[in-house]
């Protein structure tokens, strides 16, 4: 009998550091933006990004750990020393060791995401490209200290397809970079277009996997054509993030017919909704594909289990119970450290409870093997 070790690959973990952590990677013209991005967060009291303290209720509570002690109020990430919000790669590895996680995909947290958004909204093309290159250089250096354990998620500019492809080639050989995590579809909008295929084809040629952190879109902001309207009708389900709708957009766009080897991992969306939604999608697709001009080789449900999409779960036990319908090979796991989805410092215990009662091979594939194959690690 084969022996399957207990190994955990968290496909969704964050740096919740203040944005000034990347000060040495960008020029003087960006320093004010880094200072204005989130460092003081508050529970409940919400405001627009970079207009003062803002509410990030899921931001860092796992690091606080004692949930029964958390109250409404302000949390200063620069002074509280909450795990996941300070320090370098060695500190991060220490937190993963406590949590008994073997490897983790590292994505930007609230402050870094805010800084990236601020630059995207206020700067010209050249500055936007320069800032994203600075971020990618930073995350490369951060993760390269522990190759194979810290897997850096790079950003790409949304100024043009050519700019995005150029950055792909620049980061391909940067140490520590494992995946690309775009904030929009490659065309720069919240709706897929056929020109995106150029970017995806380049990704496959370079062997660079693509990670969608939740969804890149959600109606109504992404509706700009009849096909978008039909996609919303056919694929409308919101589970924690816009991930399910973004998956529906990709399916309806026909990208998996044109590029059948293209694969995405979609985080923070769970998977137990799939059996219900696959039936609903097919039912609505049969009625709305004609007027919207949606042409697919297979019904939408086929693409949900075809291997083109790797679904990601955190505490979704029903997805484990539905694994035969979803496909064991289509499931992966994440800790979401240091967000309040996380079970830090008990993630291994929680993950094993999540997979309790299933064959060891299936547990191994869900917690490690499927994602390890996707990200090009040993499995």
Image: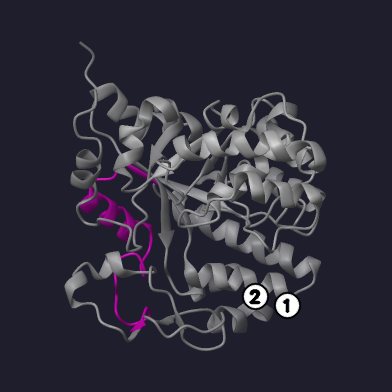
Of residues 44 and 38, the one drawn nearer to the viewer in this rendering: 44
Residue located at (61% from left, 48% from top): 246
Q: Is residue 325 left or right of residue 20?
A: left
Of residues 130 and 342, the one drawn nearer to the viewer in this rendering: 342
Q: Which residues are magenta?
A: 75-104
Is residue 258 among what the camera can see? Answer: yes
In the image, is residue 172 above or below residue 55?
above
Residue located at (59% from left, 43% from top): 247
Q: Is residue 354 left or right of residue 21?
A: left
In the image, is residue 104 above or below residue 30?
above
Neighbour tally class for label 1: few under 14, some 14-19, many 20 plus, Cα within 10 Å: few
Across and down, in percent, residue 311 comes to 47, 39
- Marks 2 and 1 sit apart, C-alpha to C-alpha, by 6 Å
Pick out the residue farthest to the bottom: 52
In the rendered image, which quarter contains the N terminus? top left
In the image, is residue 174 above or below residue 66?
above
Residue at the disc numbered 1: 122
Q: Secondary structure at mark 2?
A: helix
Q: Is residue 77 magenta?
A: yes
Circle on res. 118: 2
Q: State how many labels appear.
A: 2
């Amino acid at each position: 009998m084969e022996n399957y070790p207990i190994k955990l690959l968290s496909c969704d973990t964050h740096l919740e550091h203040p944005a000034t952590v990347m000060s040495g990677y960008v020029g003087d013209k960006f320093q004010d933006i880094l200072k204005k991005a989130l460092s003081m967060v508050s529970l409940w009291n919400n405001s627009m990004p970079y207009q003062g303290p803002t509410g990030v209720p899921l931001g860092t509570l796992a690091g606080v750990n004692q949930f029964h002690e958390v109250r409404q109020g302000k949390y200063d990430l620069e002074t509280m020393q909450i795990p996941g919000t300070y320090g370098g790669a060695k500190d991060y590895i220490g937190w993963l060791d406590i949590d008994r996680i073997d490897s983790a995909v590292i994505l930007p947290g609230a402050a870094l995401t805010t800084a990236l958004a601020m630059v995207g909204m206020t700067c010209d093309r050249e500055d936007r490209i320069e800032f994203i290159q600075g971020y990618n250089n930073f995350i490369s250096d951060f993760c390269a200290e522990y190759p194979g354990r810290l897997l850096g998620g790079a950003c790409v500019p949304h100024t043009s397809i050519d700019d995005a492809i150029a950055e792909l080639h620049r980061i391909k050989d940067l140490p520590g970079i494992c995946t690309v995590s775009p904030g929009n579809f490659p065309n720069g909008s919240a709706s897929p277009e056929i020109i995106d295929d150029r970017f995806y084809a380049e990704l496959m040629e370079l062997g660079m996997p693509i990670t969608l952190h939740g969804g890149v879109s959600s109606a109504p902001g992404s509706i700009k054509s009849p096909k978008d309207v039909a996609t919303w009708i056919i694929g409308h389900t919101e589970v924690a993030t816009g991930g399910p709708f973004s998956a529906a957009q990709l399916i309806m766009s026909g990208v998996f017919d044109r590029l059948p080897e293209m694969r995405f991992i979609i985080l923070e969306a769970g998977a137990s909704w799939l059996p219900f939604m696959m039936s609903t999608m097919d039912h609505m697709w049969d009625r709305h594909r004609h007027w919207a001009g949606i042409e697919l080789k297979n019904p939408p449900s086929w693409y949900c289990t075809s291997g083109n999409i790797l679904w990601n779960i955190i505490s979704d036990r029903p997805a484990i119970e539905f694994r035969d319908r979803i496909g064991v090979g289509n499931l992966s796991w994440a800790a979401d450290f240091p967000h309040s989805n996380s079970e830090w410092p008990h993630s291994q215990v929680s993950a094993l409870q999540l997979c309790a009662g299933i064959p060891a091979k299936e547990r191994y594939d869900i917690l490690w093997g499927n994602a390890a194959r996707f990200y090009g690690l040993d499995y």
